[in-house]
Amino acid sequence: MAKLKARFNVSLIDLHCHTTASDGKHSPKELVQLAKQRGLQTLAITDHDTVAGFREAQEYAAQQQLTLIPGIELSCVWRGILIHIVGLNFDPSSAAMLQAEQTQIEVREQRAVLIAERLSKRLQRQINIDAVRELAHGGQIGRPHFAQYLLEQGLVNNFASAFTKYLGAGKIGDVKTGWPDMADAVRWIVEAGGIAVMAHAHRYKMTRTKLRDCMQDFVDAGGRAIEVAYGTMDASQQQHMVELAKQYQLLGSCGSDYHGPNRFGLELGVMPSFPQDISPVWKHFSKV
Ligand code: AMP
Ligand code: MN
Ligand code: MN
Ligand code: MN
């Protein structure tokens, strides 16, 4: 831990985190309060496939003098691999963003039905999708809500094993059908006037060559930034992301990917120091 602490600090800027509008534990307002307590100056709420958290917190953040940047984390696929693209500083009421949200909400709903069907078959037990929906509290339904349901039903021993057994990559509940192509996700963000950021690229299980192909397609589609300071990434992962940023002449973004207490050991605002030789994405935001 001492070693960890040396590289990690509380940043003044966090451009990747979640609320109850998707799979986070805090309401948008609570997250703004937490950001203020931690001394953050700038926050982007980047819920999965929805801007609802930003909309809900916008007025409160202004009262609290916290700069809140419109954000989203879009689910999409590239060559069959699930990729997350963060959108920042777009117009939340633009036709392109409304279209993106509408599409993604439908995909999530249809996907949830498929996940429930598959889990029911595997577990030989009816999964009550309405109960899972309730766990999402009206927010975007996702695999973490299924994990919580399985845990509450005593079907797994802990949250993490719900993913290792049933919901993680390649498992029965990992349904990717319906997600748009990465180029479409990037295009929505660009058309909405925002900056498309490649999220946590160090976590994708790809060879370096394949990741470069993916980055090239991302740039060709209009992507302009990559996360170079993220949650608990280690020094070599950060170095790799910095290399990619330089190779594709991308801006750098930073974020914790905080989802709430006791999730992945992440904390709001906590991330490795921002690399000095990378141009920060927030320099392109008029508000910061
Ligand atoms: P979804 O957006 O429905 O595809 O669900 C993906 C979300 O599940 C991620 O954003 C994480 O919050 C969470 N997640 C993914 N993998 C794991 C894992 N192995 N353990 C716990 N949570 C996970
Ligand atoms: Mn999540
Ligand atoms: Mn993600
Ligand atoms: Mn995230």
Image (spheres, helix red, strand yellow):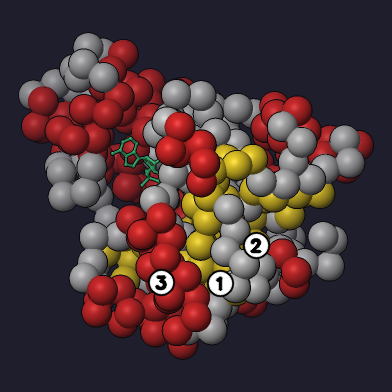
Q: Is residue 15 above or below residue 188?
A: above
- The residue shown at (16%, 50%) is 170
Q: Is residue 55 above or below residue 181?
A: above
Dot in front, 3 or 1 = 1
Spot occupied by residue 45 in the image (x, y as percentages of width and height)? 64, 46
- Earlier along the polypeptide chain: callout 3 or callout 1? 3
Residue type pointed to by label 2: Leu
Which residue is the site of mark 3?
182
Residue type pointed to by label 3: Met
Q: Is residue 111 left or right of residue 117?
A: right
Spot occupied by residue 174 in the image (x, y as percentages of width and height)? 23, 47
- The residue shown at (39%, 78%) is 215
Which residue is the site of mark 1?
225
- The residue shown at (54%, 33%) is 267
Q: Could you classify mark 1 by the number of other residues whose Cα lies within 10 Å: few (under 14), some (14-19), or many (20 or more)? A: many
Residue type pointed to by label 1: Ala
Q: Please indicate, yes or no, whether residue 138 appears anywhere in the rendered image.
A: no
